[in-house]
Image: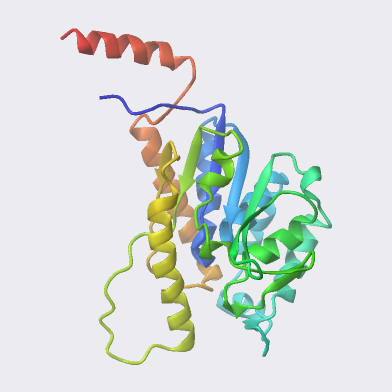
Amino acid sequence: MFRRYIDKKNIALALGSGSAKGIAHIGVINKLIDNGCKIKAVAGTSAGAVIAAYYAAGKLHLIEEYLLSLNATKAFNKLDLSFGGGFIGGKKFTNILQQHLGDIKFDDLDTPLYVVATNFDKGCEEVLSSGSVIDALRASIAVPGVFKPHFYNGTYYVDGAITNPVPVDALYDRGYKNIIAVSLSGTVDERVDPSMPSILSSLSRTIDIVTAYLTSIRMGNAAAIITPVSDNIGMFDLHKAKDVIDEGSRATEIIFKNGKIIDKCDRKLEKIVRILSSND
């Protein structure tokens, strides 16, 4: 029985949330491009939104080079502590985005981009696709209790993963059908540590649980799913970028090996083989 093929020249990519695990998206995109794929549109949630924006702006190499330059000390120094709304203010992160991307607007991008955030005031998912890209990204990454909620266009936003951790629907609802989803949530293992969890551990595990359940019901319209495994990567382990990028590349290679992505011209051969097989 043949799987549905994916035309490598007409891919839409949905990049999931995952904090530092989201660095795997760089490896995914690089592997797709190395194999001749053309990405026509990208959607992202939280960390996935950040990588999607760099790709859409034609500047993926900048974030890759930046992350690979970090050690543990440098990564920690990029966090600005706050005492209201979340223990990280987000200004240092925003400054990095502005240094790389400038005051870029969605209309300036080389590739259509859709950023998922959660409208805190209305209590619903919102897909941002116009106006300031930097504001959209800051809204999408605002993990509750970790980053301050982001106030934008008269509304407070928090992490998009709360409502849509892998934004397949953000693409499908806008007419894209040839969608590859990249999910970083995996499964949530049973906790065996008997000690009281720390505040950060509680927040991180809670988000993992919510994300895993939501992911399982939000990817039905994906033509293929890539699942990099980075279980040993913590929320702020940005200094482990090389290992995470390599895992994204490895996970993507699997769908090429199983023939999931093909050249459109190969579809005729696929039909011929299917007919021959049915006559056996």
Quadrant for the C terminus, please.
top left
Q: Which residue appears farthest toward the right when viewing the image? A: 103
Evaluate whether residue 280 shows in this view: yes
Q: Residue at x 59, y 52 (%)?
A: 44
**Could you say where residue 116 lies in the image, as x and y percent from the top left?**
61, 56
Direction from residue 257 to residue 33 in the image, left or right: right
Q: Out of 15 and 207, give the one closest to the viewer.
A: 207
Evaluate whether residue 33 shows in this view: no
Quadrant for the N terminus, please.
top left
Q: Out of 200 and 167, give the one closest to the viewer.
A: 167
Direction from residue 147 to residue 270 in the image, left or right: left
Placement of 277 over or under 233, stated as above or below: above
**Could you say where residue 246 lies in the image, as x and y percent from the top left?**
46, 53
Q: Residue at x 44, y 53 (%)?
A: 183
Direction from residue 151 to residue 201 in the image, left or right: left
**Could you say where residue 236 lies in the image, as x and y percent from the top left?**
54, 74
Question: How many discs appear?
Answer: 0
Name the colour scheme.
Answer: rainbow
Q: Residue at x 66, y 62 (%)?
A: 66
Q: Residue at x 74, y 66 (%)?
A: 96
Q: Out of 73 and 270, give the one closest to the viewer.
A: 270
Q: Which residue appears farthest toward the front when viewing the image? A: 122
Toward which corner of the image does residue 270 lie, by quadrant?
top left
Placement of 93 over or under 176, stated as above or below: below
